[in-house]
Image (spheres, rainbow, N blue to C red):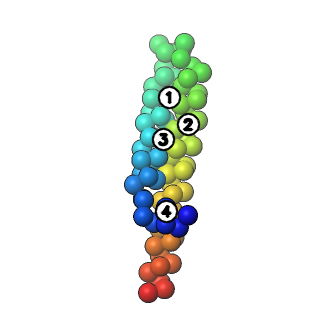
Amino acid sequence: MKTLIRDYPYIHLAIGLLGNLCFLVGSVLFFKQFEAWHTTAVWLFVAGSAGMLLGALGKAATDIINARENRNR
């Protein structure tokens, strides 16, 4: 797990960016003219929030692992 987190930090960035995109599209779909898309907007909003959280957790894990490794050097 440590190798995945340390060696592939762009995965966390991609998850976070995808979450941001879902969040943005879901937010736009909440406008009145897209009322028929309300359920989709809700799910995009939830998926976007989850993606942003996962991206932030991955970044935090990367920072913690790097700090521990730097401290042990």
Nearest the viewer among 7 and 18 is 7
Residue visible at 44% across and 87% down? 73
Residue visible at 47% across and 13% down? 33
Horizontal placement of 1 versus 7: left or right? right
Check whether the beta carbons of the residues at disc 4 and disc 3 lie within 8 A of each other: no
Nearest the viewer among 18 and 24 is 18
Residue 2: x %, y % from top left: 53, 67
Distance of label 1 from label 3 (alpha carbons) = 10 Å
Check whether the beta carbons of the residues at disc 2 and disc 3 lie within 8 A of each other: yes
Numbered disc in front, either 2 or 1: 2
**Dot 4 or dot 3, earlier in sequence:** 4
Q: Amino acid at mark 1?
A: Gly
Residue 19: x %, y % from top left: 48, 41
Residue visible at 49% across and 35% down? 23
Q: Which residue is mark 3?
A: 19
Distance of label 4 from label 3 (alpha carbons) = 18 Å
Numbered disc in front, either 4 or 3: 4
Q: Which residue is mark 4?
A: 5
Q: Residues within 10 Å of mark 3 (few under 14, many from 20)?
A: many
